[in-house]
Image: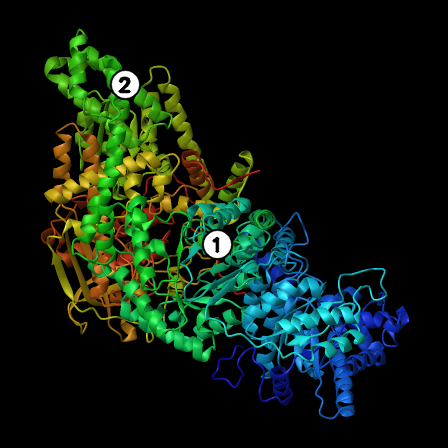
């Protein structure tokens, strides 16, 4: 348990001034240079002890050899050890060290004596104390001190003993802490005056010792002075683990020791430069106890230097003012100490220097950031949340390449590297440990300090246990209150790390300047006063938030940050400031030129305000002076919020930059030098319409008949397109563009051909329609275009087409194939019904099924049994040509039809088999017992400021654009990936950029011409749940019932999840006595979408027509997201949000908006209730078809839930008992409910007339076993 | 340990009673062997028991145990995916038997492609398969769905061996 200053514990690291001996020690150190003793081992060696001496009586029968275990002699030869202490004291030593250099369980494990550790340390301390007291008795007025010697152990925490596995460690930080703690307990019990971890070869081992010491002091509420001593192992001036002396000091300074020094390994002469360096940077006393020169096996003591030699070297140190404590290590004897005492007595002690306040960090090398320090760059690329490349390398466990990323950051100038493994698929603690251990083996990386970055404290702690340098914790905050904040701060301090403090408090993230400053001031006071943290170890991150999002209140975000930095630096003296830079430009994802300019301009102003460091991609920062003038002005207008239209102007500029790039590619007109056939072919393959009319005219004049142009060069070009598309070398948008060229060429030729065009090569005929009750046609249109490109004559009957019309058209045009499309689930029933009708009318024409809700399984199991002709579900436009070609092929069609039947049969068998592995369904009663039931008396229910119906009849399109989620736009065009990463996709990247640019061009037209008419209706009403229904009231008293909405509950038996969810669970039950609220909405881009698209269709431009429709859908979805934000604000809880647009699109906010007909509330018929509540036909002009599809198609609807734990889920399979219950609640016949809920039925309804597929539902009895 | 063994023996009796398929002794052998290996991997006893209760067959239990062991061996840094598996199964319309059949097919596919992949990534891919058919009527068996997805979209989350 860590204690703050409010507890009755002394400041960490500082000596307990109430202790007499501590005070006497300080008094003496202020007056003169103190003497510490010499080597214990050297003195013991002189006695040439045998195995029996080491064993004594107590370990006579110990199974292992004990000779050489010098520490053991405190128990078995206490007389000898005491005598050595007396010799040193009589030689003049003020401080003697206990005989406990190897007194840890880790070191004693070599002898199998771990169990004696406490006793051994206690006894050693008592012996030394006895000797000291004896000499003090013999010399009244003299004070002698006992230092408990703590060796480095025989293992190293920063280095791997296995060259083939650099991440391996023979000892962990926690093992070291435990082992040291045990030793410290023995030493203190024996009465030592000082604790002295010494001969440190690995700073991480020493940090573990410091951690153990502080833990011990905290637990025992007692403190004694601490001396630290390191070993420089060779002439390179570094520790064995690679640190320079100054880096070492920065790593252990948090111990606030009485002294720090160097001992062992070198003789005084070789040690001089390092003692000199240490004496300049250490703001505590400095100790030095070298070996008696370098080892010489031929010498008696193993070392060369005589007392006279060593003492004169050390006299030089004293003369230079390096020393406060001096003595000897290996090879030195009481004679050496006596000689040193004599030589140094004339010199005053070193004066402790006053150092400039600075943030002092370290890797293998030190990093000191004082008042005039340059701006620090924290490399951001080793962060899985910010770098997809790094994330992938870690997921693939390609650590060598991941290390390269780290190395590049350092090579590109990063002063610190940020390391983050916050990814759901990773074990953060393990990944952090593994990666930091690897970094420790790479001196060119580990020379810089590490910023250990995680939102999980356990991951941060895992990281802190791996780094020997002084690192930065990123981050802590007041988000979870003061207790948790102080606890983490004290731990960070104990591990010897600086901290980044995010400007969050219990209410959330600070967005305004005032909030940022207020939170940082509060944190500063807590850290400096309660946690006693050095102000220089505090770094504030006042949150860089995204600007230019289109939301007015975001316009000041950059300025708020800059001004907050200025004030924080003034009111929190000594603290530093930092921030994650890339957030500021997030609105311009995909446009690196603008982003880099924004970063550079932002930093320019933030640094002037006092920003000390930022997390950036080292190496890609633009130079401020080199930013093009126009761009700089636009960017600074945004950053400094200088104009109301700053965002709009920068967006326009950004689009221009991209457009220019495209134009230059287009302007390469070398292809115009080819033959007319080559040019037409090129135009078709590249989708270029600019020259289609003159080229077609040239071809018309060259060929005997216009039809020859179509059958010749145009069809040849389209064949290439078809082949490239089939081979995956062309993508859907390109194919649709090619079709546009073809259509324009054919349209140009049409007046010259009259009837000829109907006879083109006996084209196969494909009749296609969106089925009755459904209005969605983007997928259908794409299939039409793709088939038309491949020589098919496509008869497109449009949307909401009943079966009679489809079959009549098929007869009229002698169709070779029929296609039926649909998006919503009820359309599937239409398809079944249509298939039955085709069978009844004797059709044998192949039937193609497509659309988002169709599936191979549904087609095989539910549709195929009703139609004897060939039937095939096509899931992807890229497959449709192959399927159609097979189905009409004169030789292959029969075999292909047989293959399809075989495939259906296989699917049916597989489905039957899977029924034996069908999920168990729990009874509805039991599912309701395990409902999600929060403590409603404690649940926060916010009261909306406005209740009832609200209509927004005309919403600005510009306002909606920032809310567009572009990823689904690319999916419509079968470009698979996430925006904006898709732009870097190896396969789709270039095409995605081109498509996006085209979309931006059309978007501009849409906005300029106000081509869409965005509108919305929403309402929030008082409500309560009653069972699985939600009652909605007109009045707050809940007396006037408006309507009742019905929901379904999960019934699939769970393995681990405690709840069986139903949306009604997220509304306060009537029985709770608390009034809750419930909402609903409908938004649309209007029929204007279809009208605008038609304009392009009339111009034979299917590409732009489909583009417009897909943008219509995006606008509707974006409007739904934007409206939800407005509704959350109205509901009051949204006002606390400070999410970026990206976070809003990812739905990180509280509350949900599920749509009827989708997984959480799968019954489409509930949409009618929503329509009645909102009067959506009249208020926004959106109607429902007989199958509950929304018309116009670019529309979105849903319910609103505000509960803090509300979430999306899938109801999944339900059982008969719930269907019966639901039918009763809705007062509908069971068969009707079964029809509408067919996707969710966990059983086969009795009158389904389908294949007898299922076994009767199985209810597994619940076995009442006690959980173990 | 004695208490745990008694509980597992009782579970074996109940599994035999409810599922049949094999003898009680065979269930017991499968449960004891799996439980011991799973505990050695660091699973909590409660998690082991939940898994035993959920499975429809002894073969499924042994297969899942093998998967966990293989994941630990091949990907020692990845977290043990019990909760990930339970979450995936609980959030889908499929039983653990359906998931096991799909994971068997996945293992075969990986073997055919000389690849290895940790279990959590496989579960992530299957979650996507499930998301793709959410609310589609007549969901196909998960293994068929997986087969179709692997055919249509491939899988680049594996490591070549």
- Circle 1 sits on which residue? B84
Mark yes or no: residue A395 visible: no
- Of residues A1 and A306, the one drawn nearer to the viewer in this rendering: A306
Q: Is residue B116 left or right of residue A943?
A: right
The answer to which of A471 and A45 lies nearer the viewer is: A45
Q: Determine the chain carrying the residue at label 1.
A: B
For the residue pair B159 and A538, the one nearer the viewer reads as: A538
Determine the residue located farthest toward the top in the rendered image. Answer: A704
In the picture, measured across the screen, residue B139 lies left or right of residue A752, that is: right
Task: Tell me the crowding category of disc 2: few under 14, some 14 to 19, or many 20 or more residues within 10 angstroms, Cα based.
Answer: many
Q: Quadrant of the C terminus of chain A?
A: bottom right
The image quadrant where one finds the N terminus of chain A is: bottom right
Report x, y in % for residue A1211: 35, 54
Q: Which mark is residue A1248?
A: none
Per the image, label 2 sits on a secondary structure element best described as helix
What is the crowding at mark 1: few (fewer than 14 residues within 10 Å), some, or many (at least 20)? Answer: some
Q: Is residue A1053 above or below residue A696?
A: below
Query: Which quarter of the picture shows residue A931?
Result: bottom left
Residue A475 percent coordinates (x, y): 43, 64
Q: Is residue A17 above or below residue B125?
A: below
Q: Secondary structure at mark 1?
A: helix
Q: CA distance from mark 1 to mark 2?
A: 51 Å
**Does residue A651 appear anywhere in the picture?**
yes
At x 67%, y 64%, the residue is A271
In the picture, measured across the screen, residue B81 lies left or right of residue A733, that is right
Where residue A790 sits: x, y (%)? Answer: 28, 22
Mark 1 or 2: the one toward you: 2
Q: Is residue A1078 above or below residue A995?
A: below
Q: Identify residue for label 2.
A: A717
Image coordinates for residue A1136, horizontal then vertical, percent: 27, 67
- For the residue pair A1131 and A95, the one nearer the viewer reads as A95
């Amino acid at each position: 348990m860590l204690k703050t200053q409010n507890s009755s514990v002394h400041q960490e690291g500082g000596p307990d001034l109430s202790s007499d001996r501590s005070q006497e020690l300080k008094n003496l150190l202020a007056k003169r240079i103190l003497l510490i003793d010499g080597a214990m081992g050297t003195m013991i060696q002189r006695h040439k002890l045998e195995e029996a001496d080491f064993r004594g009586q107590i370990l006579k029968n110990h199974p292992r050899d004990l000779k050489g275990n010098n520490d053991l002699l405190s128990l078995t030869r206490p007389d000898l050890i005491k005598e050595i202490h007396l010799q040193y004291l009589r030689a003049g030593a003020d401080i003697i060290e206990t005989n406990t250099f190897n007194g840890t369980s880790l070191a004693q494990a070599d002898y199998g004596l771990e169990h004696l550790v406490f006793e051994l340390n206690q006894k050693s301390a008592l012996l030394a104390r006895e000797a000291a007291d004896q000499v003090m008795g013999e010399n009244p007025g003299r004070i002698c001190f006992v230092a408990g010697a703590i060796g480095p152990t025989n293992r190293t925490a920063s280095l791997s003993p296995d060259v083939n596995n650099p991440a391996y460690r023979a000892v962990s930080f926690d093992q070291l802490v435990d082992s040291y703690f045990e030793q410290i307990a023995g030493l203190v019990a024996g009465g030592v005056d000082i604790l002295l971890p010494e001969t440190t070869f690995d700073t991480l081992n020493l940090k573990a010792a410091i951690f153990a010491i502080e833990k011990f002091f905290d637990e025992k509420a007692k403190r004694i002075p601490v001396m630290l001593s390191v070993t420089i192992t060779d002439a390179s001036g570094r520790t064995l683990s690679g640190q320079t002396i100054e880096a070492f000091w920065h790593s252990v300074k948090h111990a606030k020791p009485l002294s720090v020094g160097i001992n062992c390994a070198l003789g005084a002469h070789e040690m001089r430069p390092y003692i000199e360096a240490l004496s300049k940077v250490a703001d505590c006393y400095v100790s030095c106890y070298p070996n008696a020169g370098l080892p010489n096996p031929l010498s008696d003591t193993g070392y060369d230097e005589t007392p006279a030699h060593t003492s004169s070297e050390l006299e030089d140190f004293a003369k230079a003012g390096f020393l406060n404590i001096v003595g000897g290590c290996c090879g030195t004897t009481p004679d050496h100490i006596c000689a040193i005492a004599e030589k140094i007595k004339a010199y005053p002690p070193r004066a402790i220097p006053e150092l400039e306040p600075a943030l002092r960090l370290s890797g293998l090398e030190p990093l000191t950031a004082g008042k005039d320090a340059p701006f620090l760059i924290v490399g951001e690329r080793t962060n899985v949340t910010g770098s997809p490349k790094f994330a992938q390398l870690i997921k693939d466990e390609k650590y060598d390449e991941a290390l390269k990323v780290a190395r590049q950051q350092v090579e590109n100038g990063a002063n610190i590297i940020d390391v983050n493994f916050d990814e759901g698929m990773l074990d953060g603690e393990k990944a952090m440990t593994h990666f930091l251990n690897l970094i420790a083996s790479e001196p060119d990386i580990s020379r810089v300090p590490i910023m250990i970055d995680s939102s999980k404290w356990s991951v941060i702690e895992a990281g802190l246990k791996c780094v020997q340098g002084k690192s930065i914790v990123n981050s802590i905050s007041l988000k979870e209150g003061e207790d948790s904040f102080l606890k983490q701060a004290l731990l960070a301090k104990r591990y010897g790390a600086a901290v980044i403090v995010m400007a969050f408090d219990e209410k959330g993230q600070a967005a305004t300047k005032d909030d940022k400053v207020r939170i940082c001031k509060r944190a500063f006071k807590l850290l400096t006063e309660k946690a006693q943290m050095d102000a220089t170890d505090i770094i504030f991150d006042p949150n860089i938030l995204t600007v230019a999002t289109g939301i007015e209140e975001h316009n000041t975000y950059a300025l708020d940050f800059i001004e907050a930095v200025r004030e924080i630096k003034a009111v929190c003296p000594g603290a530093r400031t930092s921030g994650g830079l890339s957030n500021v430009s997030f609105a311009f994802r995909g446009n690196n030129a603008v982003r880099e300019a924004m970063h550079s301009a932002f930093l320019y102003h933030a640094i002037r305000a006092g920003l000390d460091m930022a997390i950036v991609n080292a190496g890609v920062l633009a130079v401020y002076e080199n930013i093009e003038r126009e761009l700089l002005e636009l960017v600074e207008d945004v950053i400094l919020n200088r104009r109301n239209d700053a965002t709009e102007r920068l967006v326009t500029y950004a689009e221009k930059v991209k457009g220019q790039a495209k134009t230059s590619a287009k302007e390469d007109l070398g292809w115009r030098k080819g033959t007319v056939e080559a040019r037409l072919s090129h135009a078709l393959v590249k989708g270029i319409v600019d020259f289609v009319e003159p080229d077609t005219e040239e071809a018309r004049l060259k060929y005997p008949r216009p039809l020859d142009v179509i059958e010749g060069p145009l069809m040849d070009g389209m064949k290439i397109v078809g082949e490239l598309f089939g081979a995956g070398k062309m993508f859907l948008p390109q194919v649709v563009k090619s079709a546009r060229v073809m259509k324009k060429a054919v349209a140009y030729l049409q007046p010259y051909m009259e009837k000829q065009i109907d006879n083109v090569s006996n084209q196969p005929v494909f009749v296609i329609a969106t089925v009755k009750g459904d209005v969605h046609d983007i997928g259908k249109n794409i299939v039409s275009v793709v088939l038309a490109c491949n020589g098919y004559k496509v008869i497109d009957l449009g949307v909401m087409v009943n079966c009679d019309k489809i079959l009549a058209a098929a007869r009229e045009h002698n169709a070779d194939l029929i296609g039926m499309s649909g998006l919503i689930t009820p359309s599937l029933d239409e398809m079944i019904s249509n298939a039955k009708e085709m069978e009844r009318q004797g059709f044998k024409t192949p039937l193609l099924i497509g659309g988002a809700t169709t599936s191979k399984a549904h087609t095989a199991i539910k549709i195929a049994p009703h139609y004897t002709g060939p039937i095939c579900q096509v899931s992807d436009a890229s497959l449709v040509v192959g399927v159609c070609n097979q189905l009409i092929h004169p030789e292959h069609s029969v075999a292909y039809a047989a293959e399809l039947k075989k495939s259906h049969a296989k699917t049916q068998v597989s489905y039957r088999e899977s029924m034996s592995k069908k999920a168990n369904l729990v009874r509805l009663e039991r599912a309701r017992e395990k409902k999600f039931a929060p403590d409603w008396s404690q649940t926060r229910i916010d009261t909306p400021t406005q209740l009832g119906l609200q209509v927004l009849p005309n919403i600005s399109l510009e306002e909606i654009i920032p809310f567009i989620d572009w990823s689904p736009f690319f999916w419509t065009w079968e470009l698979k990936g996430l925006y904006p990463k898709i732009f870097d996709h190896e396969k789709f990247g270039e095409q995605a950029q081109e498509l996006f640019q085209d979309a931006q061009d059309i978007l501009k037209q849409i906005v300029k011409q106000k081509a869409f008419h965005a509108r919305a209706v929403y309402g929030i009403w008082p409500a309560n749940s009653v069972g699985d229904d939600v009652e909605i009231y007109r009045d707050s008293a809940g007396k006037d019932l408006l309507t009742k909405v019905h929901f379904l509950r999960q019934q699939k038996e769970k393995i681990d999840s405690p709840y069986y969810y139903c949306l009604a669970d997220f509304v306060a039950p009537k029985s709770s006595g608390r009034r809750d609220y419930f909402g609903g909405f409908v938004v649309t881009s209007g029929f204007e979408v279809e009208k605008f698209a038609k304009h392009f269709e009339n111009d034979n431009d299917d590409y732009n027509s489909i583009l417009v429709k897909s943008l219509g859908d995006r606008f509707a979805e974006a409007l739904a997201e934007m409206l939800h934000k407005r509704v959350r604000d109205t509901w009051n809880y949204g006002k606390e949000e400070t999410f970026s647009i990206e976070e809003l699109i990812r739905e990180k906010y509280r509350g949900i908006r599920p749509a009827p007909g989708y997984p959480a509330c799968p019954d489409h018929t509930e949409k009618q209730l929503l329509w009645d509540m909102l009067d959506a036909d009249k208020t926004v002009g959106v109607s429902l078809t007989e199958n509950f599809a929304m018309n116009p198609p670019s529309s979105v609807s849903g319910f609103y839930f505000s509960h803090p734990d509300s979430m999306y889920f899938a109801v999944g399979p339900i059982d008969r008992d719930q269907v019966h219950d639901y039918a009763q609640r809705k007062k509908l016949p069971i068969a009707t409910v079964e029809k509408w809920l067919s996707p969710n039925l966990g059983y086969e309804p009795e009158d389904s007339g389908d294949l007898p597929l299922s076994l009767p539902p199985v209810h597994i009895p619940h076995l009442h076993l006690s959980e173990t | 340990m004695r208490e745990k063994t008694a509980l597992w023996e009782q579970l074996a009796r109940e599994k035999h009673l409810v599922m049949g398929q094999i003898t009680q002794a065979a269930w017991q052998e499968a449960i004891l062997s799996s439980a011991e290996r799973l505990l050695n991997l660091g699973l909590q006893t409660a998690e082991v028991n939940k898994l035993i209760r959920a499975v429809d067959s002894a073969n499924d239990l042994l297969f899942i145990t093998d998967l966990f062991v293989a994941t630990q061996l091949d990907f020692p840094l990845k977290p043990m995916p019990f909760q990930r598996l339970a979450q995936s199964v609980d959030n889908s319309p499929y039983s653990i038997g359906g998931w096991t059949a799909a994971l068997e097919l996945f293992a075969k596919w990986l073997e055919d492609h000389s690849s290895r992949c940790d279990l959590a990534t496989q579960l992530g891919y299957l979650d996507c398969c499930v998301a793709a058919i959410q609310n589609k009527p007549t969901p196909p068996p998960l293994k068929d769905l997986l087969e179709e997805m692997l055919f249509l979209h491939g899988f680049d989350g594996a490591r070549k061996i």
